Amino acid sequence: MAEAEHSECLYCGSALERSKGRGRRRIYCDRACWRGARRKRQQEGGAPKGQYHFPEALSIANDLQTAVAELLNLEHAHEGLATVLSQVRLIGAELENYAAAAVSDARSRGAGWDEVAVAACQSRSTVRGRWSEKAVTRLFQNRMKERSASIGERPVPSAARQEILADAEVGAREETRAAARSSRKLASALSFLHRGSGLHIKGVAAHTGLSSSYVSRMLSGERIPTWTAVRLLAETFDADPGDLRALWEASQGLVRPTRPPLHEAVARLTGAMRGIHLAAGRPPFEHVAQLSSGSLTADIVEGALAGRIVPCWETTSSLLTALGAQPADLRGVWEDTNYAFLVCVMATPDDGPPPGGMQLEE
């Protein structure tokens, strides 16, 4: 019998035992430690040299959104069937890429193949073969090659198409700037909550189960967090995660649902304004009123942030400006809220109470 050699697991630090024979040297206790180490590397933004970086499902979902919007532009420009169907094929391929990324994300969080099989409504052997690490790596490497090869091969668009593309490019640049602004506001809000909590970075990491470096990068704005991370941080800081939801969605460039019911619309608007209030350091209502050069009162500021009133756009704009935000970033959210409130008012008898006890500012 060969003499045993001991070393430590690179994840949990437990002693490893192996024979001095042929075969690859073990560096983890088991698959659970291997997955835990991989999850930790992803949270910290690092990976061993030579390891392929899988795109996250969220990034591919954003690409899917862009691809579908491009299909809509093709329809508006009355492009030919061949061009439209080519875009449809691209969307179909991106759907497969998204499924692979979603499974990869779930696996990195510790999901087993049995769980993946149930979610995909397929057998365990099928999902293992379809979404194994080797298969997913090959899929994304091919995706990267195809995207690189497609550059420079696009046909010259028609005049109408060029005009649509120009408008879309301007809109995309503005959306990118708005997302960057929201990302900075989100980091500022989280940093303010962190300072008020009295916890050190290591303490936050211990409460949330996140790595210290990941927490530090989120609070400094170097890393855009996942919603799960934002929720964990808010709960650790004894804050309402809903106050940060709109900022997080905007930082991800997510498209908000249009024409939501009144309670959802008001919750989104007030949550967004409270998040911006947090990012500004939660100044007193009287101070915000002073920053508005007299266009606001402390009562209006308090009512708007509490969701008791739906302020007119001029008031909303003054409030956001006083808090150091760009009013245009919340224009669509305000319009949805104003529309939902007016619909409810028109559906309520003249002598009935305002819906939800709220007021619409004149």
Image (cartoon, grey):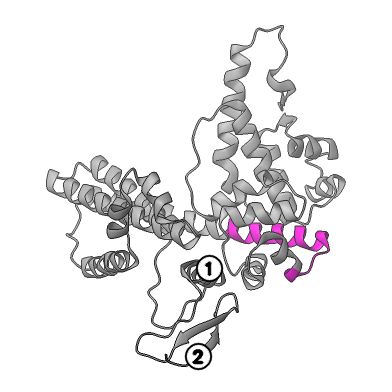
Q: Mark 2 points at which residue?
A: 5
Q: Distance between the residues labelled 1 and 2?
A: 24 Å
In the image, residue 197 lies in the stretch drawn in magenta:
yes
Q: Quadrant of the N terminus?
A: bottom left
Q: Is 321 left or right of 25, judged from the image as shown? A: right
User: Which residues make up the magenta segment?
Assistant: 181-202
Predominant secondary structure, magenta span? helix
Q: Residue at x 72, y 6 (%)?
A: 351
Say which amino acid is labelled 2. Answer: Glu
The C terminus: image quadrant: top right
Where 348 sits versus 251, above or below?
Answer: above
Residue 114 position, x and y percent, is 40, 51
Is 322 or 235 nearer to us in this picture? 235
With respect to residue 139, does 117 lie above or below? above
- Does label 1 or label 2 sit earlier along the sequence? 2
- 318 or 218: nearer the eye? 218
Q: Which mark is residue 36?
A: 1
Q: Can residue 111 be seen in this view?
A: yes
On residue 209, the disc is none
Which type of secondary structure does the marked residue at label 2 adopt? Answer: strand
| Res. 232 image quadrant | bottom right
Please tell me whether residue 205 is drawn above or below residue 80 in the rendered image: below
Q: x, y (%) of residue 254?
A: 48, 48
Q: Tell me the residue at 37%/74% (across/down).
A: 52
Relative depth, front residue between 165 and 126: 126
Q: Residue furthest front?
A: 1
Residue at 82 percent across and 45 percent down: it is: 289
